[in-house]
Image: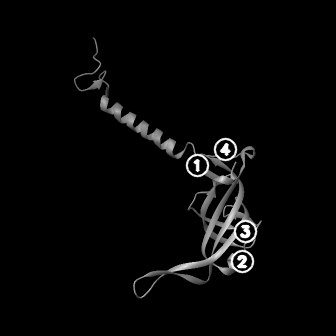
C-alpha cells in the first residue's frame, strides 16, 4: 500500500499535522531569540591583558557641604558589592539650585542653602566592549545610571554623568 505525503486530514504521512510542525518551529524560534537576548553576548573579556584606562564622571545633586568637603583627589571608590570603581582625579563643587514657583506663576532657580552639587572625575582600569564600558572587571558604567559608592570618608549615591571616550586609547 502506497502512502500519500499528505492525507485527506492534512497530516504528513498520516501521522503529524502541518500546523503542529509550524507550532514547534515557532516555539523553537522563540527559544533561540530568548537565549540570544538574555544569555549570549554582552559579557566583556576583562582579563588583565586588556584593561584600558576609562575616565567617567559621577554627579551628586543637593549634597551637604560637609559631605562634599570629605571627597579627596586620589581617594579610591568602591561599589556596594566591593568592586573597585577607580580613583578620583578631579572634584568640582558648585552651589546647588532648586526650582521654586513664585506667587506670579513663574519658576525660578534658587540657591539651596547648605547644599552643593559635586562632579567627581574618576579614572579606572576597565574595559570597553562595543558601546559598554566597565570599571574593574564587572562594574558597568551606564550613563544616567544611579550608583552607590564608598570612599575612605564618604558613602553616598550619585549618577554616572559622562564617560569620556577621548581619554581612552
Dot 1 falls on a residue whose secondary structure is loop
| Image point (57%, 61%), residue name | 145
Dot 4 falls on a residue whose secondary structure is loop
Mark identifier at residue 45: 4
Mark identifier at residue 131: 1
C-alpha gap between disc 2 and disc 3 = 12 Å
> Residue 113: x and y, percent?
60, 85
Labels 4, 1: front one: 1
Q: Which residue is mark 2?
A: 69
Vertical placement of 4 versus 19: above or below? above
C-alpha gap between disc 4 and disc 1 = 14 Å
Labels 1, 3: front one: 1
**Sequence-wise first label, 4 or 1:** 4
Dot 2 falls on a residue whose secondary structure is loop
Q: Are marks 1 and 2 in contact (CB under 8 Å)?
A: no
Q: Are marks 2 and 3 in contact (CB under 8 Å)?
A: no
Dot 3 falls on a residue whose secondary structure is loop
Vertical placement of 130 versus 140: above or below? above
In this view, the residue in front, 99 or 130, is 99
C-alpha gap between disc 1 and disc 3 = 27 Å
**Sequence-wise first label, 4 or 3:** 4
- Answer with left or right where residue 53 lies relative to residue 58: right
Amino acid at each position: 500500500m502506497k502512502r500519500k505525503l499528505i492525507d485527506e486530514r492534512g497530516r504528513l504521512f498520516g501521522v503529524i499535522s502541518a500546523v503542529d510542525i509550524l507550532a514547534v518551529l515557532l516555539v523553537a524560534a522563540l527559544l533561540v531569540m530568548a537565549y540570544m537576548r538574555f544569555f549570549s553576548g554582552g559579557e566583556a573579556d576583562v582579563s588583565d591583558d586588556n584593561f584600558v584606562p576609562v575616565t567617567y564622571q559621577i554627579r551628586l545633586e543637593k549634597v551637604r557641604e560637609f559631605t562634599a568637603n570629605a571627597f579627596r583627589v586620589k581617594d579610591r571608590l568602591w561599589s556596594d558589592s566591593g568592586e573597585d570603581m577607580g580613583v578620583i582625579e578631579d572634584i568640582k563643587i558648585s552651589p546647588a539650585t532648586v526650582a521654586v514657583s513664585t506667587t506670579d506663576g513663574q519658576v525660578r532657580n534658587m540657591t539651596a542653602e547648605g547644599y552643593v552639587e559635586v562632579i567627581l572625575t574618576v579614572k579606572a582600569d576597565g574595559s570597553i566592549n562595543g558601546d559598554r564600558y566597565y570599571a574593574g572587571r564587572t562594574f558597568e558604567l551606564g550613563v544616567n545610571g544611579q550608583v552607590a559608592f564608598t570612599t575612605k570618608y564618604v558613602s553616598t549615591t550619585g549618577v554616572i554623568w559622562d564617560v569620556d571616550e577621548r581619554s581612552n586609547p
